[in-house]
Amino acid sequence: MEKLENFYNQIKTSPVFYGMNDEELKGLLECFHARIRRYEKGDMIIRQGDMISNIYLILSGGVNIEKDSYWGRRIIISRLGKNENLALSFVGSKDVEANIDAISVEDTLVLVLSYEKCTSMCQNACTRHKILINNLFQILSKENIELIQKIENVSQKSIRDKLLTYLSNEAQKKHSNSFDIQFNRQDLADYLNVDRSAMSFELSKLQKEGLISYNKNHFELLST
Amino acid sequence: MEKLENFYNQIKTSPVFYGMNDEELKGLLECFHARIRRYEKGDMIIRQGDMISNIYLILSGGVNIEKDSYWGRRIIISRLGKNENLALSFVGSKDVEANIDAISVEDTLVLVLSYEKCTSMCQNACTRHKILINNLFQILSKENIELIQKIENVSQKSIRDKLLTYLSNEAQKKHSNSFDIQFNRQDLADYLNVDRSAMSFELSKLQKEGLISYNKNHFELLST
DNA sequence: TTATTTTTGTTGTATAAACAACAGAAATGT
DNA sequence: ACATTTCTGTTGTTTATACAACAAAAATAA
């Protein structure tokens, strides 16, 4: 069992608790029945159809947000890591079932907060709750913008354009033309909605043409 | 010039102001420097690169959220109508430029609220602000879920699957197997990221096979 | 009404991507 | 160290879709 205390310093830096002092943070964690859950590679954290009333904050590890299409194809919506939230939109949308799966892709620690418990207790009256809801609003905003970017990525018409758009966006996020990506080839293909082998082929073509260079998960955009 | 007073009754029903009494609503509208803007078909309400610090609420008409890809292709992210918000995520993400265009597709009235003005004035202290931020959180949650659904739509591998997924989702939203869609054929193609003519062809094939029937913008899902 | 523009449906052709099958490399386990 | 599994790249074939060009229908304007 992981001790909450060992993670205070990290939790403090999370956007969820931005702007709170130590006292407010500790109060909130208590009022929220905060606890830590550990997931192993492949574990389902959230399943399609679940009703979500907890705030999930990833402390370490990595999580895929996925959706299985009606015809059995896997769609990766996004990959989340440290200090990011899972399924926050379903906390905000009461009475809406989760329409995604959240799957741990490595050993993952998640901080779980019972949102319901707190809101029913303090009726949004306490200052820490006010700060919190403000933070959640900002976090969701950011998620929203990233979803739009994902839509841009997958909406390109060719594999080549999808790759270039995705890699450019990643470079911009990392503020460098040289960066690591989080996906392996199969996951990247499922994220961009293309066939893995066709994508591999296109990647090496891009490399031969001198547009990019890569090695395993490290990529570099080359200026012409 | 449109008079704000004429829209009170409608504005009251908007999710943005859910749970407020008349007094709170009027106070808020004042504190937010509320005003109404009219846009004609084709007008740009928001452009890529804009910094957004206003809350936009559509009072009537329709708006496309679009993105022009690097290579000049048009991507339709979503179509918004009455009582929906524009670009709310950019209000929450301070210092992030809008990465989309918002284009009026018919005569449209928009209520504009200066979010900055209010937050700097009342420091989130007043009750109406507390209600508001709670509402915004819920609205963003809903938007988020719809973006995920859009990703599901465009992530299907064939035109046929995209159409069936899209139409099923629409039917579910409208709680009926018989419904109107908001897009014309070209817009629907840009929304699903497919070629219009190929899509038209697939639509008539689906009709011949007895899976759906349609006439102009009215569609019906037929049970087998 | 007639003329003009916009929207939608249809067809043939060229092309890009899915799919399948496989080999080599890398990672993992024993 | 070896065996086993997973991951990645390559190729040929099949298939679906983009694209172009056009006709019919509907909407709009004169």
Image: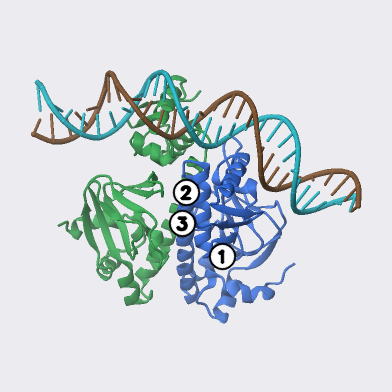
Chain colours: A green, B blue, C brown, D cyan
Judge left or right: residue D22 versus residue B120.
Answer: right
Numbered mark located on residue B197 in the image: none
Looking at the picture, how far across and down is residue B129, in whole percent?
49, 71
Q: Do labels 2 and 1 share a chain?
A: yes
Under mark 3, the amino acid is: Asn
Tell me the crowding category of disc 2: few under 14, some 14 to 19, or many 20 or more residues within 10 angstroms, Cα based. Answer: many
- Which residue lies at the image location 53% right of the left edge and 36% below the top edge? A157
Under mark 1, the amino acid is: Lys
Residue assigned mark 3: B144
Residue assigned mark 2: B151
One can see residue A143 in this view: yes
Name the front one of labels 2 and 3: 2
Quadrant of the frame with the N terminus of chain A: bottom left
Secondary structure, mark 2, is helix
Name the front one of labels 2 and 1: 2
How many numbered marks have been drawn onto this rendered protein structure? 3
Secondary structure, mark 1, is helix
Q: Answer yes or no: do the residues labelled 2 and 3 have beta carbons within 8 Å?
A: no
* Real-space Cα separation, disc 1 to disc 3, in angstroms: 26 Å
